[in-house]
Image (cartoon, rainbow, N blue to C red):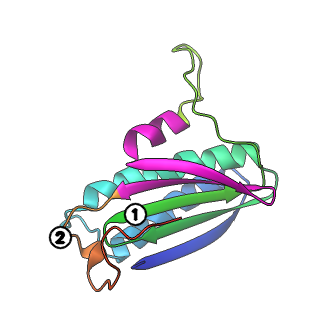
Amino acid sequence: MCHQTKARLASVPDSVRIARSITTAHLEAWGATIADVAHGQVADAVLIVSELVANAVRHCTHELEVSLVCHRDRIEIAVTDDNPEPAVLKQPHPLVPGGRGLLLVDALAQQWGQQQVYGRKTVWARLSIPPGSALARNCSEPVGRSGP
């Protein structure tokens, strides 16, 4: 990996805002500034982390962990919570509010998934980084190395 950060957050609604701020600040500090070819991925990453954290806050009881990892060719976002129940991709009725978070993640992410380990669940998503991005500079990792 080229860059990594983790944050433990309380299971409260304000954690969504905090996770968005952490994601934006780190991706920009790592090189995805407005002039970088990967700057468009910042908005997608922020929306994905918002949806994953909002789901975790809604369904877990204590704290959650947000992980942001940047590889040479992709950004990985993961949110771990204390609810082992799987996240479910739903197709809600058009008039029903809510329930579309994973639909957004599915539409934006190159790939997403989840795993349950020891009574905890991690939902993750990957975004591609365009070639030439500053996010990959000074990274000794080969392209395409497998992630979680």
Left or right relative to 49: residue 139: left
| Rendered image quadrant of residue 25 | bottom left
| Rendered image quadrant of residue 29 | bottom left
Left or right relative to 27: residue 88: right
Q: Can you give x and y, in whole percent of width and height, for residue 142 in the image?
A: 32, 77
Give how far apart the Cα atoms at labels 1 and 2 are: 14 Å
Asked if residue 70 is positioned above or below residue 119 in the image, the reply reads: below
Instruction: Assess disc 1: are there few (<14), some (14-19) or many (≥20) residues with their C-alpha within 10 Å of its C-alpha.
Output: many
Q: Can you give x and y, in whole percent of width and height, for residue 89 in the image?
A: 57, 33
- Closest to the observer, 71 or 14: 71
Magenta extent:
102-127
Point 72% across, 53% down: residue: 12
* Number of the label disc, if any, that sits on residue 132: 2
Point 58% across, 72% down: residue: 6
- Closest to the observer, 79 or 11: 79
Q: Which amino acid, mark 2?
A: Gly
Left or right relative to 8: residue 32: left
Asked if residue 10 is positioned above or below residue 1 in the image, the reply reads: above
| Rendered image quadrant of residue 134 | bottom left
Q: Can you give x and y, in whole percent of width and height, for residue 145 in the image?
A: 39, 71
Badge 1 or badge 2: first in the primary sequence: 1
Q: Which amino acid, mark 1?
A: Ile
* Magenta stretch holds residue 110: yes
* Quarter of the rendering occupied by the N terminus: bottom left
Point 26% across, 60% down: residue: 39
Point 57% across, 20% down: residue: 92
Residue position marked by numbered label 1 in the rendering:
75
Mark 1 and mark 2 residues within 8 Å of each other at the beta carbon: no
* Magenta stretch holds residue 125: yes
